[in-house]
Amino acid sequence: MEEVRVETAGGRYPVYVGDGLYEGKFVEEIRRLRPRTVALVSHPTIFAVHGERMLAALGEALGAAGSVARFLFSQGEEHKNLRTVEAGYVALLEAGINREDVLISFGGGVVGDTAGFIAATYMRGIGCIQVPTTLMAMVDSSIGGKVGVDLPGAKNAVGAFHQPLAVFSDTGVLQTLPAREMRSGMAEVAKYGFLYDEALLAEVETWSGRREPGAAGLEDIIAACAVHKARVVGEDERDVGGVRAMLNYGHTFGHALESAAGFGTLLHGEAVAVGMMMAARLSESMGLAQGGLYDVHRRLLAPLLAAMPLRVEVDAEELLVYMRSDKKRGKGERFVLLEGPQAPRLVEDVPRELVNEAVEDIVEDIRSGEPWP
Ligand code: GLY
């Protein structure tokens, strides 16, 4: 097991990474918090596979006097919205959850963001423990306290900063994660690699190259990503100093892709992978990066897009419309670009024609289909 510490003004907490955490550290932590009732927020698919194990751990931690109130909602980005949040408030209210109790978010990024937002706002905020069950959520969204939901056509448009009390990334649950979801998570790992850590890029390549890439050996990769995330969040918790903004590498394009494709069509990591390719192309055409940066991205990221359903349906024009409505546009056009691998730079005033060109080039490349795996 590895432990990474997050230290922010909004909360100091551990991120545990390892196999078999639910029966160990997790039980200890719940006992220490001594909630009367735990609100367990999840979705039916993850609950069907791992719910028994989670309930057994909670039973052991809470003892006979404690109870667990469940709130399960359907899987997918299309359910990350205010209707789900309201249903969650009602479920918590009916279960008598109050500020001494704890909410446990048990699922992937959609569950984590939505459950975290419920915790941030229900009774003006209750404690939240993040128990991510996807690689994507383990390496990124469960850490750092960004929680929220989408509005129609606007991803993460409503939200809060609400640091969890602890994060438990049990690598055992990744054994049952579908391959497409694993690849999506690997795109977020590659993001840390391009931004900060060459060794992580090598890990992604090795993982993709294995004949049967699975969950083995992931503890170190997840812990390495958690260290990067903890450092960044520690320096710039509320995303105002330009440090945390770097984590949006590929995301300005990626969020627009997710919206244009219709929420739930692309996995977050798939959209971010394509977004990073667009950002790499833009870095080249801006004269920031040497030629070759895009090719490196393509080589590493294309294998992660093997199951992306949208190869031939991405429309460049539509994408650009969504990009203009992105909430992060506040200070004008702002992109995370690379001067090279591990040399990120936040760039404002990017010429519109170059953005358009990068989008069109990569959409064209994806459409061509030819050299893709
Ligand atoms: N996922 C980006 C951030 O947490 O800031």
Image: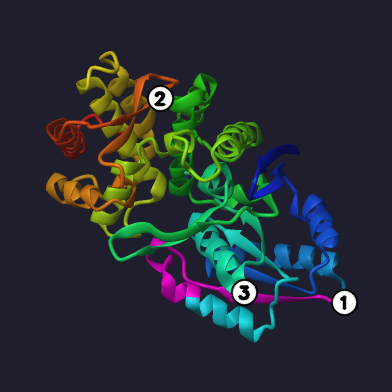
Mark 1 or 2 closer to N-term?
A: 1
Please name the residue that numbered disc 3 is placed on: 123
Quadrant of the frame with the C terminus: top left
- Find numbered disc 3 in the image and state the secondary structure of the residue it sits on: helix
Please name the residue that numbered disc 1 is placed on: 64
Q: Quick check: 355 above or below 144? A: above
Q: Quick check: 179 above or below 99? A: above
> In percent of the image, x 42 and y 76: which residue is there?
83
Could you give the CA–CA distance between mark 1 and mark 3, rounded to whole angstroms? 26 Å
* Magenta stretch holds residue 318: no
**Left or right placement of residue 268 versus residue 362 in this view:** right
Q: Is residue 313 visible?
A: no
> In percent of the image, x 27 and y 24: which residue is there?
283
Q: Position of residue 75 (x, y in %)?
A: 46, 65
Q: Return the residue nearer the eye: 30 or 354.
A: 354
Please name the residue that numbered disc 2 is placed on: 344
Mark 1 or 3 closer to N-term?
A: 1
> Which residue range is magenta in the image?
64-85
* Magenta stretch holds residue 83: yes
> In percent of the image, x 59 and y 46: which residue is there?
143
Q: Residue furthest right?
A: 64
For disc 3, the neighbor class at 10 Å (few under 14, some 14 to 19, many from 20) is few
For disc 1, the neighbor class at 10 Å (few under 14, some 14 to 19, many from 20) is few
- Find numbered disc 1 in the image and state the secondary structure of the residue it sits on: loop
Amino acid tagged 1 = Ala
Q: Position of residue 172 (x, y in %)?
A: 67, 48
Mark 2 or 3 closer to N-term?
A: 3
